[in-house]
Image (tube, grey):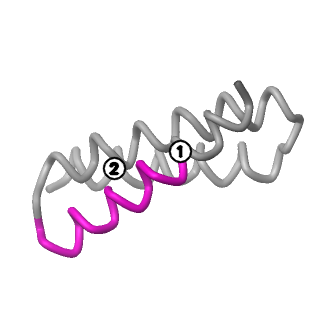
């Protein structure tokens, strides 16, 4: 389960970055946030708190960007 979450998060973040590069909005934020959710769950399961903090901060940045755009 942990391996699937980690690689799903990786895939979602890559696809989200591609969508951002091609300015496909707001789908890019949805996909990036799916990646964040996968990584948050994985980081809690593996006790990788640096990854947890990174993804929570990224989520806040994306949320603020979405609300003010």
**Of callouts 1 and 2, the N-terminal one:** 1
SS at mark 2 in the image: helix
Q: Is residue 36 left or right of residue 5?
A: left
The vertical placement of 22 against 28, above or below, is: below
Q: Nearer the viewer, residue 57 or 20?
A: 20
The vertical placement of 23 against 61, above or below, is: below
Pointer 1 with pointer 2, Cβ within 8 A? no
Q: Quadrant of residue 20?
A: bottom left
**Is residue 14 highlighted in magenta?**
yes
Residue at image mark 2: 64
Q: How busy is the neighbourhood of tag 1: few (under 14 within 10 Å), some, or many (20 plus)?
A: many
User: Magenta part of the protein: which range?
Assistant: 9-23
Q: Quadrant of residue 21?
A: bottom left
Q: Nearer the viewer, residue 28 or 57?
A: 28
Residue at image mark 1: 9
SS at mark 1 in the image: helix
Where's residue 67, x and y in %? 22, 44
Query: In which quadrant of the rendered image does the N terminus lie?
Result: top right
Residue at 27% from the left image edge and 40% from the top image edge:
30
Q: Is residue 14 left or right of residue 28?
A: right
Q: Main secondary structure of the magenta part?
A: helix
Residue at 59% from the left image edge and 46% from the top image edge:
7
Q: How many dots with numbers? A: 2
Where's residue 37, x and y in %? 52, 33
**Is residue 32 highlighted in magenta?**
no
């Amino acid at each position: 389960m942990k391996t699937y979450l980690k690689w799903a998060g990786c895939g979602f973040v890559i696809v989200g970055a591609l969508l951002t590069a091609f300015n496909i909005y707001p789908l890019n934020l949805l996909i990036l946030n799916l990646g964040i959710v996968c990584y948050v769950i994985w980081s809690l399961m593996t006790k990788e708190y640096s990854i947890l903090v990174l993804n929570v901060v990224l989520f806040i940045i994306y949320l603020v960007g979405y609300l003010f755009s």
